[in-house]
Image (tube, grey):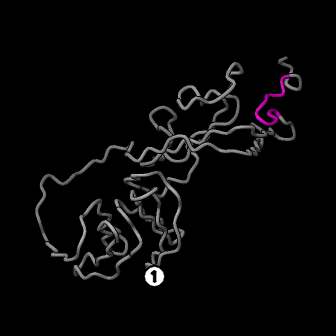
């Protein structure tokens, strides 16, 4: 079967829904659990989601206004990442050397830091009371590609099940719903992205121009 190229250009993307829960059931084979080590960590601030870096044996512990980096073998505090108002969780992306801390204080933000130096690199605007954050190695893979074809829709209303039918492109990064698509990979995240006023070409044929299907060109008018 010949391969056809699909090109999408969008002037505006709508990040519609971020699901921070796992779609993949975890199977724990260990039948019993026991405490093997206890760390007594001092410092001010409440605790929230703890993130474990198994490759580097690091624990990331949000403490309201800062996030502690702890050696998981010794319990020693390696670093203290400042700059948060109400820290909740940490996501690690080793392939780009970055970590991300969700901060629900104020207007909400995601703080970006360097995984090697633990230095703060900047912030990304979020929503007030931003809570948990998660990432896995397949979070940035395209898990879904579809085209909205309901030509009677004139605007998006904020309901995904309807808005994904809006004329344009519907992309999703993360879990491909393997039970339905038979994909051989999975992810703990699924981020839906909808386009407005996009341009789409299939090979050299433009089939969507600024969000409008070229019905005459397609012989469907």
* Picture quadrant of residue 39: bottom left
| Residue 12 placement (x, y as % from top left) | 69, 45
Is residue 161 toward the left or the right of residue 74 in the image? right
Residue at image coords 67%, 39%: 195
| Residue 202 placement (x, y as % from top left) | 80, 38
Residue at image coords 83%, 18%: 220
Asked whether 147 or 176 is in front, the reply is: 147
Asked whether 137 or 100 is in front, the reply is: 100
| Residue 216 placement (x, y as % from top left) | 88, 22
| Residue 154 placement (x, y as % from top left) | 69, 24
Residue denoted by label 1: 117
Residue at image coords 74%, 36%: 1
> Which secondary structure lies at badge 1?
loop
Q: Which residues are magenta?
A: 207-215
Task: Check if residue 188 falls in the magenta segment.
Answer: no
Is residue 173 toward the left or the right of residue 28 in the image? right
């Amino acid at each position: 079967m010949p391969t056809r190229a699909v090109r999408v250009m969008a002037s505006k993307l709508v990040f519609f829904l971020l699901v921070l829960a796992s779609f993949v059931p975890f199977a724990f084979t260990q039948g019993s659990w026991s405490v093997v080590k206890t760390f007594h960590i001092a410092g001010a601030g409440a605790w929230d989601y703890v993130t474990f870096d198994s490759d580097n044996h690091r624990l990331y512990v949000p403490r309201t206004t800062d996030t502690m980096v702890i050696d998981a073998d010794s319990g020693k505090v390696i670093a203290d990442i400042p700059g948060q108002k109400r820290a909740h969780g940490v996501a690690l992306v080793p392939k780009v050397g970055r970590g991300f801390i969700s901060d629900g204080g104020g207007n909400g933000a995601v703080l970006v830091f360097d995984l090697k130096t633990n230095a703060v690199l900047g912030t990304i605007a979020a929503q007030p009371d931003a809570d948990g954050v998660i990432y896995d190695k397949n979070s940035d893979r395209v898990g879904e590609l579809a085209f909205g074809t309901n030509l009677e829709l004139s605007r998006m209303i904020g309901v995904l099940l309807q808005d994904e039918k809006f004329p344009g492109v519907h992309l999703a990064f993360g879990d491909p719903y393997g039970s339905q698509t038979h994909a051989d990979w999975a992810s703990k995240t699924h981020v839906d992205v909808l386009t407005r006023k996009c341009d789409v070409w299939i090979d050299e044929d433009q089939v969507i121009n600024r969000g409008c299907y070229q019905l005459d060109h397609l012989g469907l008018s």
